[in-house]
Amino acid sequence: MSANPENLFGSAANDADAQETREWMDALSSVIQSEGPERAHFLLEQLLEHARQNTVDMPFSANTGYVNTIEPSQEARSPGNLEIEQRLRAYMRWNAMAMVVKANRHHPPEGGDLGGHIGSFASLASMFGAGFNHFWHAESENHGGDLLYIQGHVSPGIYARAYLEGRLSEEQLLNFRQEVDGKGLSSYPHPKLMPEFWQFPTVSMGLGPLMAIYQARFLKYLHARGIANTENRKVWVFCGDGEMDEVESLGAIGLAARENLDNLIFVINCNLQRLDGPVRGNGKIIQELEGEFRGANWNVVKLIWGKGWDALLEKDHDGALRKIMMECNDGDYQSFKANDGAYVRKNFFGRDPRTLKMVEHMTDDEVWNLQRGGHDSQKVYAAFHSAQNHKGQPTVLLVKTVKGFGMGKIGEGKNTVHQTKKLGDEDIKAFRDRFNIPIPDSQIAELPFYKPADDTPEMRYLHERRKALGGYLPHRRVKADESFTVPSLDTFKAVMEPTAEGREISTTQAYVRFLTQLLRDKALGPRVVPILVDEARTFGMEGLFRQIGIYNPHGQQYTPVDKDQVMYYKEDKSGQILQEGINEAGGMSSWIAAATSYSTNNRIMVPFYVYYSMFGFQRIGDLAWAAGDMQARGFLLGGTSGRTTLNGEGLQHEDGHSHILANTIPNCVSYDPTFAHEVGVILHHGLKRMVEKQDNVYYYLTLLNENYAMPGLQPGTEEQIIKGMYLSKQGPAIKAAKGKEAPTVQLLGSGTILRESFAAQELLEQDWGVSASVWSCPSFNELTRDGQDADRWNLLHPDQTPRVPFVAEQLAASTGPVVASTDYMKAYAEQIRPFVPKGRNYKVLGTDGFGRSDFRSKLREHFEVNRHYIVVAALKALSEDGIVPVAKVVEAIKKYGINVDKVNPLYA
């Protein structure tokens, strides 16, 4: 496929010495033919470097011609029966289409569409056929299993295959997107909804590519640490070309190359269309992505043209055809496939008399049937084979397809194809005829699914291929086969006991002590995965650098600047810490890989990912939701939490809402502990649930960087801590006027502001003669869920003894108003209002508004959550109950110098 140089690099008129140019080209051709392309590549690199050293400006280009990377002579030949595979694909196309159309033909009385997609799988069917038939291993005795990140919109095609395999029933296909009654299939890949089928949620576009990179890295991590043999496993990631506009899609490709993740294969389905139209109508998305990935040092394989183009390119001696291929933009290519062969002849080949002559012997139908590479089974096999066997780099396959392939005039290549889900009978007949489906006209209106008999060659072939690859995919492991016993709570007594007199620690330090002790456990310690995003010293974790090392597949190839220090920066090939740099999305993706390892690797791992709490759920919330869908198990730890604890850092750093966001994820169990012993009890309970019981939950704890004395565990309160509320300090006995009882209030709090409640307790006693009991509430979220659960049960069981919410149960024996204060928005503690005993006045203080920089005491005054505001709130509630006069409230406001005219912090 050689081409005349003047047509590729400039006209002959610009060549000062055409003979010399020809000699250089002939010399290079000779090297390619006699010594191979590798030698030619080496020589070219040497020449380019020599030119640069001699001040010849050589601008870099990461792009190659708009042709296939693999020459026809270099293609690995498919060992399969391509005719049978084509028939199987046709049946899957039909069943996928029928599933979606059926779901949208039958409506309940109230109406409404279920949606669904036909066009995406239509463009990908050949690629999935190659993968399932020849490349993708299921987990078996000799193979850990390949991991498939499947494009969300192609789920009907995956269900169609599973139906032929006998893994899904016709009833399930008939209930596509109808899941409430338990018979249906989820709209997209959702492990939560189909826990033994889907592994990875991918339809929140951009997250699949990002998570897959860190998943591939985690496989290498497990192997390097001797926990699992992952040598032969591959991570295959299917993305749309439009999806690559999501910043997450390309955000970590540098990591993949830097760590030589040759177990990672991206397959980008370049059908040139987003959801509403062309991806790069004025450009060429394949060329753009080639530059992105090759520039990041990936192995790039382009599959653009099917075999029908090979003969034409072979005749393209002067490069005219290649020139047109490069000149046409994606908007042009979309129009070519939305029209017919005559249009292609005129508007593509007709751009140059030489190319028009190339196809003069071909009919319009033959011109139209010149396929794109992604629909050529042999070429897809060759591309997959090349990617599978490439070493030292991740590989991206840029595969050109047609969205809606086979859908004819109703959608093929048209802007509307993504939304096409309803077909008329004539359209269905055309689809049937295109793919030779044996369904008679008399049954078209019924739109039946088609499944050959079990003894047909097609069905035997289908099962034989999957048997050879270890079993059926996709498939998800629900529980790990292995088990561990979590060390007893006594093991962590350093965290559970009171601090020595004069000693103060933070809850962050308590967490580090717990983690350090857990790492010493011979069985479970190696399964701990500490994950950091470049703030180890902020969280006091630098001591772990030397103790367990930072994972780096290349080891430490330099002498660390702090080598002479006890806690020097140590990178190691078998290091245990995952240090992600300044990269919260990467940290969360690593955490997800570890937190789902029980399923993907049959290895229980215990990830602890600590970060600034402000940079958690609001920044990586979509990943946190995906983690819930994936049934992740592990610990997220939001350090320097709350809106007033991180003095000096200001608006962007101060978190007053992460617990509200955490509560939006049903299987996220969240706590805002104040004391070291609460941290210890919660972490230990989380280990028992997630490791011993293998419950599908994950934990979020917020941690503080304030040092103060720790009171130690009150025996018997462990269960109450987990439920979210226990009495931390009983109100003092106060002598009241004769014949009267001293006023009482209940002060609830969590995190750093609980300590303000203790201070308020003293002020209420000393200044106002009020007895206040202080309740530690490590989790208003858990209290809320418990209360809502009780309410639901009572609603549905009106004839039975009502259940009592835990909040009401705890407060039942107490008296007086209840005042809750936290370092979070008022909505956090407001959640439990319905569960406070009836008739009890309930006041809530919180930190609504933007954060700002100042000392902690000033911030708490600004947000109106300090001890003085707690006292005023308590007195106000008592006055509303008629127990103290309003004048006392006014007096307290004056006494504590509260500015009643300052702007509400919500608006300040």
Image: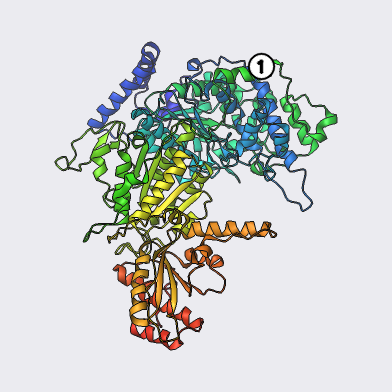
Q: Quadrant of the C terminus?
A: bottom left
Q: Secondary structure at mark 1?
A: helix
Q: How is the image coloured?
A: rainbow
Report if residue 807 is visible in the image. Answer: yes
Residue 17 place in picture, x, y as percent: 34, 24
Residue 36 place in picture, x, y as percent: 38, 15
Residue 192 place in picture, x, y as percent: 57, 42
Residue most toward the top?
34
Residue drawn at (45%, 87%) of the image: 885
Q: Is residue 117 above or below residue 501?
A: above
Quadrant in the picture for residue 516: top left
Q: Which residue is mark 1?
A: 460
Residue 366 place in picture, x, y as percent: 67, 23
Q: From the viewer's side, name the closer residue of 214 and 38.
A: 214
Q: Specify the amino acid type for callout 1.
A: Arg
| Relative side of 566 to 267, left or right | left
Q: From the viewer's side, name the closer residue of 708 and 805.
A: 805
Residue drawn at (34%, 81%) of the image: 767
Report if residue 897 is visible in the image. Answer: no
Q: From the viewer's side, name the closer residue of 93 and 477.
A: 477
Residue drawn at (35%, 70%) of the image: 860
Residue drawn at (72%, 48%) of the image: 113
